[in-house]
Amino acid sequence: MTPLVSRLSRLWAIMRKPRAAVGSGHRRQAASQERRQKHAKSNSQAKPSACDGLARQPEEVVLQASVSPYHLFRDIAEVTAFRRSLLSWYDQEKRDLPWRRRAEDEVDPDRRAYAVWVSEVMLQQTQVATVINYYTGWMQKWPTLQDLASASLEEVNQLWAGLGYYSRGRRLQEGARKVVEELGGHMPRTAETLQQLLPGVGRYTAGAIASIAFGQATGVVDGNVARVLCRVRAIGADPSSTLVSQRLWGLAQQLVDPARPGDFNQAAMELGATVCTPQRPLCSQCPVQSLCRARQRVEREQLLASRSLSGNPDVEECALNTGQCQLCLPASEPWDQTLGVVNFPRKASRKPPREESSATCVLEQPGALGGAQILLVQRPNSGLLAGLWEFPSVTWEPSEQLQRKALLQELQRWAGPLPATRLRHLGEVVHTFSHIKLTYQVYGLALEGQTPVTTVPAGARWLTQEEFHTAAVSTAMKKVFRVYQGQQPGTCKVSLLGLSQPVSPGLRPWVFSQLTDECLGEHSPLQASLERGIVLDLEKLHCGVQGRGKGKK
C-alpha cells in the first residue's frame, strides 16, 4: 500500500465515525487544555499537584497524538451520567465495613484521616475479608495517632504478624510519629502534602485519605479502579505502562464527583471488587454498563457472529488503526471472543519470583522452667521481614554435611555447645513472598536431659509455645513450627494457644503436614478458630482432608 493510499484509508475511517463523537472529543481536549492553563495561571506560585491525574504539557501532546476520543469521556453529560449511576448503586449496595463506619461517624478530622490511612495501608495487596479483624484489633489498641506513635516497633510487628508486606506497618508507625513530633499532631489536608510529608504514602493512598477524610476532589487509581476504567473505555494496553497509567489517572480525575469525592472513589473501588471482577464480571449487575465500551464490543461481536445483521452494526469503534492507538488491545494479542469484557485490560506477564533456599532449626528445651521453650532470633532491621523473629537459619548448602555443620555453628552462636548427633532433618516448607519463593529445609533439635540454657546474647530469646504464637513472627515461621510439631511423637499441638490433643496412629506426620497446609493456612477459617482458642477434632479434620481429595466439597 502506498503512503498516499494509507493516509486516505485512515482519513476515510475517521470520516465514517459519527461527527459529534469526533468533534466533541476534540472540543473536550481543547477545553481540558484551557482549564489546565487557567489552573496553572491561578496557581503559578503553588507546587504542581502530584495527584491531579493530568500529565505535564509535553506528555499531553504525545497522548493527544496517540489516543482516540473513543477511549475518553466525550462531554460533561457522559461524566454526569457515570457519576449519578455509580453513586446511586453504591448507596444501595456498599458493604458495611468498619473503616467506612469510622470515617462516617468520626467528627475529628485528624482521627478520621488516621482511620482511613490505616485501612488503606492494610488493604494494599490484601483482601478485605482478611483485613477486617486486623483493622479492628489495630484501632482498639491504637485508636489515635498519638497512641500509635508511642508504641514500640515490636508491638507493631506483633499485631501485623500474618498480614504480610511487613514494611507497611513499620512505615505507618513512622508516619504517625512524624505527624505527632513534627506536624503538631495534625494530618496534612491535601493529597499533595500527604504524599510529600508522610513516609510510605504514595499517590493512591494520599488521594484516598484526602478524598475520604477531607473531601478533596481528587481521583484515585488502584487495581480495581484501573480495571473498571479500562473496561468502560476499552483500554486493552498494559495499565502498568507509563502512558496508560497517566491516562487512567486523567480519567479518574475527570470522573470524580466534586460533591462526594470520597464516596465516588470508594464506589469505583467497590465496583471493581464486587462486580467488575478480574475473571467473572457480573455485567448484568453493573450500574454503568450502558457507558461501557467493553460491553458494547462484546455485543457487537455477538451480532457479527450470529450474522443477524447485514453489514456492520452501528457501534462506535476506535478511529485509529490498532497499530497506531496506544490504548487499544496490542496487535500481538487481538480480541479473544471467549474472554468477552475480560479482554480489557491485557496485563503484561509477571516476572516469576526468584527462588531461594534456607535451612532453619527449631531448637527446643523440653525441660525448661515454666514449660518447654524454643529459641528465636531477630532479623535485621532492614530488608525482608525486617525486625521479625525467626528460628535460627542459614543459607542452603549443596552438601548435607556442610549444611548440618553451618546450621550447628549458627545454633551454637546463640545457645552454646550442642549435641550434633541430635540434629534431625524433618522436611521442608515452601513459602512465597511478593518477589521470592523461599524453600526452608526444616531441622529440629531437642535438648533433653541437659541443664536448661537461661541466658542468650542480645537479639535472641527463649519463648514458650504460647508466647511464640503471639510474637512478631512471620507466617513462614509458623509453617516451619507446624512441621516440627507434626514430627513429635504422641501429641500434635495444633492450637495457637498451646492446646493439644492426642493423635491416633492413623494420623501420620505427612497427613498432618497436609492438613495444616490446607486447613490451617494463613487467614483460613480454621486458623481463625484456633486463634480464638477452639480445640479441633483432628480425626474429623483428617476425614475432611481425605474427602476433599476425592472431590467432595
Image (cartoon, rainbow, N blue to C red):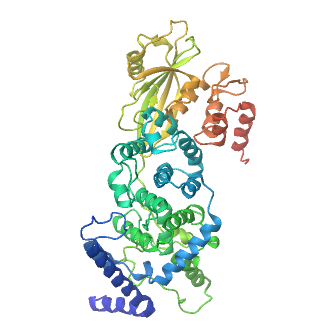
Residue in the picture at 57% in, 71% down? 87
Q: Quadrant of residue 36?
A: bottom left
Q: Nearer the viewer, residue 235 or 385?
A: 385
Residue in the picture at 72% in, 39% down? 544
Q: Left or right: where does residue 438 sit relative to residue 197?
A: right
Q: Residue 159, how many percent across, how many down?
A: 52, 37
Q: Nearer the viewer, residue 127 or 401?
A: 127
Above or below, 196 relative to 296? above
Residue in the picture at 60% in, 90% down? 309
Q: Residue 52, how many percent across, how many down?
A: 37, 68
Q: Residue 291, how many percent across, how many down?
A: 54, 79
Above or below, 461 relative to 25? above
Q: Quadrant of residue 330?
A: bottom left
How many marks can you see? 0
Q: Quadrant of residue 398?
A: top left
Where's the N terminus, which quadrant?
Answer: bottom left
Q: Nearer the viewer, residue 214 or 455?
A: 214
User: Would residue 277 be seen by someone viewing this image from the given angle?
Assistant: no
